[in-house]
Amino acid sequence: MAGRTGRGLWSRHWRWGSMLGAIFLVGMFDILGHHWHISSEGQAPCKVGTTGGNVADAIDGRSSSLQGRPQNHSIKEYDPLHFFDGELPDGTLKAELKDKQYFTIQYLKLCKAASGGPWGPRSFKCDQDESCLACAKPWNKEQAKRLIQAVQDPSLMHMRRSYIKQHFPDKEKPIVVIATNKIHFPYLLNWACGCKAHLNQDIRSTTLVLGADDQTYDYSIKRGFPALKPSMFNVSPRHLNETWANEWNLTRNNVAKMGFPDSMAMLVTLTSELLTLGYTVVSQDADVVWRKDVLAYLNSEHLHNVHLATQMAPRADAQGPVNTGFVLIRPSKMTRVFMRSLVELLPLFYMRVDDQVVWNSLLRHYLFRQLHVSILPRKQFLDLHDYTAEWIDDNTYLLHTVSNSKKIRRLRNHKEWHFTQSCEWYDKELEKLFPEWDL
């Protein structure tokens, strides 16, 4: 009897403990609408930060724009991460930033494990210097220095900002920013032709092109795209197109990579400046296709409370989980600090000839753990390979031909190469630019 009573008492305690444990876990999942927010594949992104719906959605006066600015200042009391008021949330970032506007490469120490790296294969490693700078080549530092100086140069800043304000007067509308070179310019036109074919939209007025060379700038202006010259970022086309080719004995195929580090560095620099001006930015590679209205998707209520939404990089190394070939980033104090700090890491862009490892390393940094990042569902924002093509369906919004070969072939095979005579921007002469390795 005593034994049964004891077991019954233990059983009741166990049941109460289970109930309390379940309540605790639900509460914890509610709280941890946190740094990495990964949407289920093939579904709309989950709502961040609440269990019964999005708190901000219940507040009257939320703007319907992609930027998500509130009309009612009462939203501040529901905004602990300060999406909307130009402040930083309480935490490590605010405590360490103090009166600074950004963090330097020496402060961030990305070659120190405790700061976010090294983290698996492809991480930055430099045994003699936690900032990684000692392992960068002199020309890595010199090119980065030129761009960082351009950020602060009053004359260049005035040129860039005057042009931006003239062509994009409405800050409630996002700017799609694409950095490319002349070899990959046909991919940009294929994207524009695809938007016309799938959406019946002329996407040029919402797009800003960054040319890694003067020919790309000329091509863009001739076809009605707003564009910025590389000289506005202290980037010399002569350095890109002649010095590298001679020094590295580049083949025609390798010419497709010429200017890549500079174009990615300019892209980061410009994105930082656009956030400072109050714009929402959609940054993407040229080799994408929009099959559905991507901007409408990004404006859905599911993504209102994120700082940054990106395509997934399904990798287990330091080059994931964010694929920087497609990024939405909203203006806030935290994103401005993040992007301006990323500008300070430009020597690492040149050191690795890769922007994605730098982005992911900084996103893992302990200072930016409160940055809300949503990884978009892979089947809707799809990395197009032969083995993923079977996932394409009516809910696929975007295709991105990742990797460095057979891009045009893949798009043609799946009827997504739209740069043809049926497109108003088709130019047969530009077909001569196609790199052989993409056919």
Image (spheres, rainbow, N blue to C red):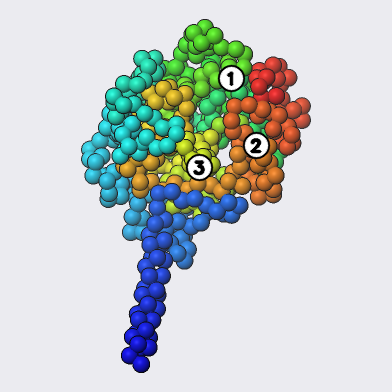
Judge depth for marks 3 and 2 and give the one in front.
2
Mark 3–mark 2 Cα distance, whole angstroms, equals 18 Å
Number of other residues with Cα within 10 Å of mark 2, as a class: few under 14, some 14 to 19, many 20 or more: some
Check contact, mark 3 vs mark 2: CB within 8 A: no
The front one of 68 and 249 is 249
- Quick check: can you spot residue 154? no
Q: Earlier in the sequence, mark 3 or mark 2?
A: 3
Q: How many marks?
A: 3
**What secondary structure is found at the residue carrying circle 2?**
loop
Of the pair 198 and 404, the residue shown nearer to us: 404
Q: Is residue 127 left or right of residue 417?
A: left
Disc 2 residue type? His
Query: Could you say which is closer to the camera, residue 260 or residue 121?
Result: 121
Tell me how far mark 1 sits from mark 3, CA to CA: 25 Å
Q: Secondary structure at mark 3?
A: strand
Image spot of residue 165 (x, y percent):
46, 31
Reading the image, the residue beneath label 2 is: 385
The residue that label 3 is drawn on is 310
Compared to residue 20, the image places residue 134 above or below, namely above
- Residue at position x 56%, y 31% in the image: 285
> Dot 1, crowdedness within 10 Å: few (<14), some or many (≥20)?
many
Which three-letter amino acid code belongs to the residue tagged 3?
Answer: Thr
Q: Looking at the picture, which amino acid does disc 1 mark?
A: Ala
Q: Quadrant of the N terminus?
A: bottom left
Give the label on residue 46, or none: none
One can see residue 421 in this view: yes
**Is 108 left, or right, of 239 in this rendering?**
left
On the image, numbered disc 1 is attached to which residue?
Answer: 256
Dot 3, how many residues are within 10 Å of its Cα: few (below 14), some (14-19), or many (20+)?
many
Mark closer to the observer (1, 2): 2
- Quarter placement of the C terminus: top right
Residue at position x 45%, y 31% in the image? 122
